[in-house]
Image (cartoon, helix red, strand yellow):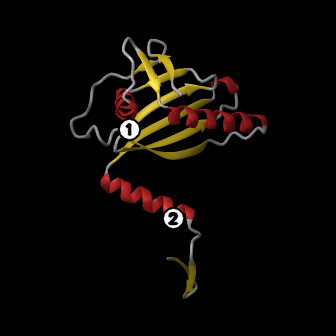
Amino acid sequence: MSILAGASRAFVASGLQVNTVSNMSTPGILVFSRALQLQYVNRRAIELIRNICKTVAELGAIVFPARVLELRNQIKERLDDRLKANNWEPFEVSRVVSERARRVLLRGFGQPDRAASHYSRIIIVLQELRSKEKGRSQQMHARMKAPERQTAGGGLLVHS
């Protein structure tokens, strides 16, 4: 499942880059309104989306991979639930997408707005995982899944 979003309605960041930062480490950023309208996209996000699904259309339209849309919709559901419960804390949902021998970390953030719920935002940060980052990501994922083992030593709690 994919969706077309008119880039003419969203602000697209310029292609200016600082030479000291490699393009590989620059994250892609997507910002959606609570009504799921694309409000901001930078060039790196377009590149990463193109790399994982190869279906970015011409003429200012962006086709989002199903996994990006699923994450966006999941964040919207949680955002709506939090707004109904008057919970104004931001939250994060992450997942790794592997397609075409590339791995992209998707970090989605729900940003509730207390003053007016229609100003709440859904932010998705895309970051390509390189081999070194893949190992770190797998280790971090394993740590989150496994219960922490703790041992006491000299009155201090030591995490192993």
**Relative vertical location of residue 112 with respect to residue 97 in this rendering, above or below:** above
Farthest residue, direction left: 19
Mark 2 or mark 1, which has the lower sequence index?
Answer: 1
Residue 103: x and y in percent read: 38, 45
Secondary element type, mark 1 = loop
User: Is residue 152 found left or right of 62 in the rendered image?
Assistant: right
Q: Residue at x 39, y 25 (%)?
A: 55
Dot label at residue 143: 2
Q: Residues within 10 Å of mark 2 (few under 14, many from 20)?
A: few
Q: Quadrant of residue 74?
A: top right
Residue 89: x and y in percent read: 66, 42
Q: Quadrant of residue 100?
A: top left
Dot label at residue 27: 1
Q: Residue at x 44, y 62 (%)?
A: 139
Dot label at residue 140: none
User: Is residue 95 found left or right of 115 in the rendered image?
Assistant: left
Secondary element type, mark 2 = helix
**Relative vertical location of residue 15 with respect to residue 126 in this rendering, above or below:** above
Give the foreground label among 2 and 1: 2
Farthest residue, direction right: 85
Residue 120: x and y in percent read: 63, 29
Q: Residue at x 67, y 23 (%)?
A: 118
**Relative vertical location of residue 37 with respect to residue 100 in this rendering, above or below:** above
Q: Amino acid at mark 2?
A: Arg
